[in-house]
Image: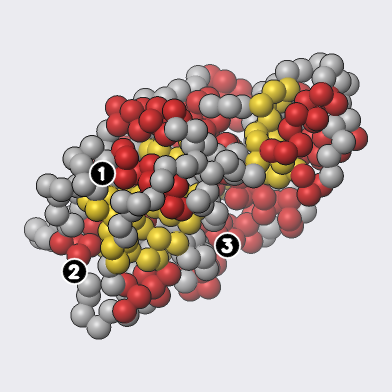
Amino acid sequence: MQEAAGTAIRNHSNLLLLSPTGSGKTLAYLLPIIDMLQQVQANGQILAVVVVPSRELALQVETVFKDQMRERHLPFRGMAVYGGRPAMDEHRVLREVKPEVLFATPGRLLDHISKENINVFSTKVLVLDEYDKCLELGFRDEMENIGVEFNRCPQFVLTSATLFVPDTEENDDNKAVRLPRFVTRRKFETVDFLATCEELKTRIEKVIVPSPAKDKLDTLGRLLSYLDGQQAIVFVAHRESVERIWKYLYDNKFAVVSYHGGMDQDRRERALYRFRSGASNVLVSTDLAARGLDIPTVKAIIHYHLPLDKATYTHRTGRTARWEESGAAYLIVGPEEQIPAFIAENEEGSDSSEEIKTLSLENQPIKASRPEWSLLYIGRGKKDKLSRADILGFLCKKGGLTAKQIGRIDLSAHASYAAVSRGCLKSLLSNIAGEKIKGMKTIIEEIRK
């Protein structure tokens, strides 16, 4: 898929890329964009714009791009712009950084365009990533406006895990997403791997978990105990349910974080840092987490509230079995619930590994497994010229840790996060008490929630 998509983009074709969740679409368009950057003179202009449906996805794709720059020792800059923070601050950073690639949510991108903070005429490639999700979230008007603003852009790339139909065709079965007219007016090459990636299904085990009670909390606790510390995402339908389930699991000593659109950005980012680092092994979320999160260590997806449609099921379940990993999708079914037909019906000729299994947990005690890692909060970040190497050196020299006792390190503008072995936490905090990091005094403490 990546080779086919890369060939089309390098040939300057408009591309419609259809491929399942977790199959690597991000690198499919980023790698040829990076090749393009090495062949042209940027002169401080934005050459590629990637539009995504959420701030989390904007930050994630930005991270993938920056990782590629580090690995290849290339000088190109990328920047994410999104709502929830002042556009004026972003404009100042845009002037300072002068990124060649911009990762943007639809509304914030149009805001910067209207204020003439960015020059759309320099853009060589416009990528509309997770296009079906942008429409699902109600961004159709914004996407139409973006199409108008970038009408002189030489190349469009659209990615989706869902089929498309032109806006003029009937779509009564609701199996496809309508393509807007600003896209259908262009000639597109289609790279469709939706049908040929059926192998992905064989790596995800489907498991029904009956709940004897309408309130599924007890069954969820038993299921997580059965999973014995495997990283799991629990999907629910409402924000209020996220908080209720989080409290139940937290009270039962599970290392759990919550995640939904009603949380402020700092809390959401901190939750993801804990989960990605392995300091938490349970993430309870609305469908906000069903798109864009690429965490290879997730082994289990738990549908606490059953998905309403096939697309929701597909995107939730796609958070596991990333790349070549395997995983499982657990559906907790209450006494008055039925398994949705789109899950229960195996396609004709499907592999036996796709058959739905049933797991009874009546005799499973509820006992939380503590994760291997704890997460440190460090009150200094990129703006303080702090790097991963600085944090690693500090934890080894001042904290007395070995490299094997230090896990993932993440940096934001004004703070940093480091995973450290749980068994070493107490001695580490004692060793670094009162110590400066890179000559700077700061708060260093464990993140517990």
- Please tell me which residue is depicted at 71% across the width and 45% down the height of the picture: 407
- Evaluate whether residue 347 shows in this view: yes
What percent of the width, then of the height, locates residue 103?
Answer: 51, 42
| Towards the viewer: 42 or 7 | 7
Q: What's the residue type where badge 1 is placed?
A: His
Residue 359 lies, with reference to residue 99, above or below; the image says below
Q: CA distance from mark 2 to mark 1?
A: 19 Å
| Towards the viewer: 37 or 151 | 37
Residue at the disc numbered 2 = 345
Residue at the disc numbered 3 = 32
- Please tell me which residue is depicted at 73% across the width and 18% down the height of the picture: 443
- Evaluate whether residue 108 shows in this view: no
Residue 231 lies, with reference to residue 393, above or below; the image says below
Crowding at mark 1 (Cα within 10 Å: few <14, some 14-19, many 20+) = some
- Please tell me which residue is depicted at 21% across the width and 80% down the height of the picture: 348
Disc ID at residue 84: none
Residue at the disc numbered 1 = 305
Element type at marker 1?
loop
Q: CA distance from mark 3 to mark 1?
A: 40 Å
Element type at marker 3?
helix
Q: What's the residue type where badge 2 is placed?
A: Glu
Mark 1 or mark 3, which is nearer the start of the sequence?
Answer: 3
Q: What's the residue type where badge 3 is placed?
A: Pro
